Image (cartoon, rainbow, N blue to C red):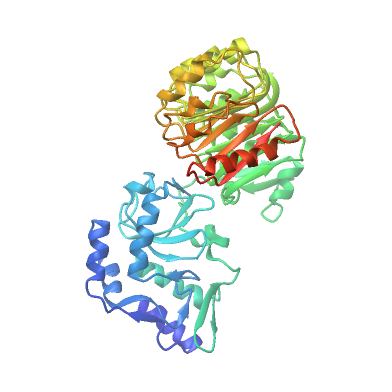
Amino acid sequence: MVEKYIETLREIASVTEPLKSSKDESALDKLKSKVKADLPDSVESFYKKYDGEADVEGFAAGFELLPISRVIAEFDFLKKSGIEFDAIGTDAISENPVSKNKWIPFAFDGSDCFLVIDLSPSKKGVVGQIIGLDMESDNAYVFANSLDDFFEKLTKLVVDGKLTVEAGDNKAAISEISGHFFNRVTEYAIMDESIQNVDVILEDEFWIKKFEKQLKNKDGKSVVSSRAIGKTTGSFRITNNPQRLSCKPFEYMDNVKELIIHHCELFDFESISKMKNLTTLYLIDCTTDSCNVAALAEAPKLKKLSLGVIKEHIDMKKLAKSKSLKELSIRELDGVSFCDLCEFSGLTSLTIEGGNPEEYEFLSKLGKLKTLKIRGVQLDNLDFLHHMPKLEEFEMHIEAQNEDGLMAIRSLTKLKSFIYPVKDLVLYKGVPTLEEAGIAHVNNGQFEAFKDTKLNSFLVLGDGDEDLMEEAGKIAEELTSYGLRIMSYGSVG
């Protein structure tokens, strides 16, 4: 079908040679060797004949069609990126990490989006299906079942005027009429039609205004289809208004990954726990109805939760039963006993502010933590550090009453960042993985202790002295004399 697409472009823009001919016979073998898989016939025949753009820019719906050398390079980039994409509107895409998928990136928008050939789909997918990756939102979409089907779709979009082809002096340029193919991604993607479609009654002014273009009147009520609600993608924010809000529409937002709500009285709160792809939730200065915040334990993919300025009781023991939650941040929670946090044994990241120092004994139970940040409290001791062998980042600006536990950092083999007002800098000697360090304004000056570390950034912690930043500058010069390359530094008074 690429030939029909090419012919359509020639008719519109008099393009002579839209693509370069493939001249390196070994290039295709290199690609197959890199991917370690056979290619679908349509893909193999395409790369035997073509290798990147010639007289057309943005050949693939405004995306640059990559030559095989770039395809191989971008394949390596994706493998190492560590991004975990969420499949939107489909069960055809494997939910394995990128490193385990065989995705051949054949087109790139030059910024944050790839088009890839999927050789490792889920059981409901098709080998060779064409998917789009949005690295800004970490979302993935299916556009076609094969490369041929994809070019057939593009041909129709050109004919329908949704893809524009502008002829230039030397090259033609293709673009989606809105400026980017992903601007209307849910229109072009293959969305699962089996997803339940029901009428949702909207009573809140906020929701009525949000979906005013999709509203219909039914029995005197404002109604919108759940499918229309489900087209909401990416991040959803409510930061000022309204003060009262039903959460019912959230239940149908299967494509929303991040939800941020400030200053709201929330009703039907359990609907948030039914969001299929919600991974990140911020609740700040919110109250809920009879359903407690702990209902979030049922959210299937909730990974990161931030709770701040909430006065009502939260059943933390129930919340701790979440099978997906890995990152928790809590601040000014009146109805929470910190002692109950010992139940969150699976956490890898915790940020906690305030509270009674005596309640912090729970930290010794969180042995899987990789990141720990403690703010606004002076602890009795740091003994919990001995129980965190996986710790990579630690931050606490107020020194503990008893600092004997600091010695534990030499046994933390993965420690990269330790932001704490350390006075005896010899403590850092023998921590080769260290990249970022905290230094007390009043210290013993033993900066040579950093020589065998990877230090590239530091923070001077003091008592509000106006010369802290000037002192930090002097320390940076001192550290540079030991062969360290300091990329950034700062101070906190």
* Vertical placement of residue 479 versus 425, above or below: below
Look at the image and tell me whether residue 378 can be seen. yes
Q: Nearer the viewer, residue 371 or 55?
A: 371
Q: How far across and how far down the image is residue 179, in percent?
A: 59, 69
* Vertical placement of residue 291 versus 196, above or below: above
For residue 436, side relative to residue 120 (left or right): right
Q: How far across and how far down the image is residue 272, in percent?
A: 59, 34
Q: How far across and how far down the image is residue 467, in percent?
A: 73, 36
- The residue positioned 40% from the left and 72% from the top of the image is 152
The N terminus lies in which quarter of the figure?
A: bottom left
For residue 482, side relative to residue 332 (left or right): left
For residue 347, side relative to residue 206 (left or right): left
The C terminus lies in which quarter of the figure?
A: top right
Q: Nearer the viewer, residue 27 or 172?
A: 27
* Vertical placement of residue 198 versus 320, above or below: below
Q: Nearer the viewer, residue 176 or 91?
A: 176
